[in-house]
Image (tube, rainbow, N blue to C red):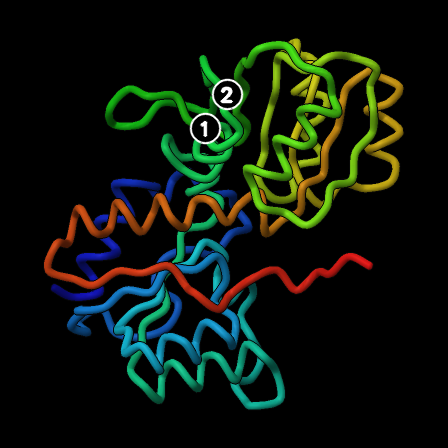
């Protein structure tokens, strides 16, 4: 098996046409013809993941976030991205990613997040189209759960996502119809409200967005970028193991969130 086979499989899971126009996905470092026996999966292709890939003997790292967002002017040791590229290239390790296409894809980041939070009757909010199997795709998801107090749901979110803390605003409603958007999806709060949701779980929420949610009467929960997206790594690793049974696949054991709470 080669890197190009991993790329082809990722295209079936999260087709390139589902990505945002500004995004950068696919093979960003390495050779398509590189033989693959070990795959390391992580949310980010940061230096800790690169070092782990070397020590474990990985042939390719598959991440959600891209190694390169914008074309760098130079590849040197002066930047973290430069050090990562030089490190991976020196050890012939490829870097592959599926970013906003995996956010939008059926079974991707936001379906996994909705399932992790125990939602049922999960659907795509504002579908952008349908895939080759006729399934709707788009960024946000919405679903239902048995009605509960907001405090009870906050505890559930923190437990299910293993996050160290939450930021939230109380919209004054019980929780039963929930929208989710892993990562920085605060701009979708109006979509969640218009869809009849009483609660929206996302990350990287801005100050004014909390106030907007409060004015709308929408419970808004910021559970952290890392914690709302990281669950997809386990799901992605399981799919890679099933597709490539001859390969060793593991989720990074060292990578985590750099944000701390005092």
**Which disc is residue 146 wearing?**
none
User: Could you tell me which secondary element the residue under label 1 belongs to?
Assistant: helix
**Which disc is residue 119 wearing?**
2
For the C terminus, the image quarter is bottom right
Snapshot quadrant of residue 149: top right
Q: Is residue 250 above or below residue 238?
A: below
Q: Nearer the viewer, residue 36 or 257?
A: 257
Q: In screen coordinates, is 181 left or right of 217?
A: left
Residue tagged 1: 115
**Mark 1 → mark 2, Cα distance in angstroms:** 6 Å
Residue found at x 45% / y 28% = 115
Q: Is residue 256 above or below residue 19?
A: below
Query: Pointer 1 and pointer 2: residues touching (CB < 8 Å)?
Result: yes
Q: In screen coordinates, is 40 left or right of 199?
A: left
**Are there few (<14), some (14-19), or many (20+) residues within 10 Å of tag 1?**
some
User: Could you tell me which secondary element the residue under label 2 belongs to?
Assistant: loop
């Amino acid at each position: 098996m080669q890197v190009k086979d991993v790329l082809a499989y990722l295209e079936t899971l999260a087709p390139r046409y589902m990505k945002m126009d500004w995004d950068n996905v696919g093979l960003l470092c390495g050779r398509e013809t590189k033989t693959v026996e070990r795959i390391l999966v992580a949310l980010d292709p940061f230096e800790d993941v690169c070092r782990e890939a070397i020590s474990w003997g990985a042939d390719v790292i598959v991440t959600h976030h891209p190694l390169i967002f914008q074309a760098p002017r130079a590849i040197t040791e002066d930047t973290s991205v430069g050090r990562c590229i030089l490190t991976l290239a020196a050890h012939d390790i490829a870097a592959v990613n599926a970013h906003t296409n995996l956010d939008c894809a059926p079974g991707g980041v936001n379906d996994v997040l909705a399932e992790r939070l125990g939602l049922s009757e999960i659907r795509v909010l504002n579908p952008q189209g349908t895939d080759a199997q006729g399934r709707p795709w788009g960024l946000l998801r919405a679903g239902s759960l048995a009605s509960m107090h907001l405090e009870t749901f906050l505890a559930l979110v923190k437990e299910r996502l293993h996050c160290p803390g939450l930021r939230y605003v109380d919209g004054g409603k019980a929780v039963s119809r929930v929208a989710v958007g892993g990562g920085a999806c605060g701009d979708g709060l109006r979509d969640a409200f218009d869809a009849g949701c009483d609660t929206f779980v996302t990350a990287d929420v801005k100050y004014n967005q909390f106030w907007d949610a409060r004015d709308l009467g929408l419970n808004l929960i910021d559970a952290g970028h890392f914690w709302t997206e990281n669950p997809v790594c386990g799901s992605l690793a399981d799919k890679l193991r099933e597709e490539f049974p001859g390969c060793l696949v593991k989720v990074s054991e060292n990578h985590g969130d750099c944000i701390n709470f005092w």
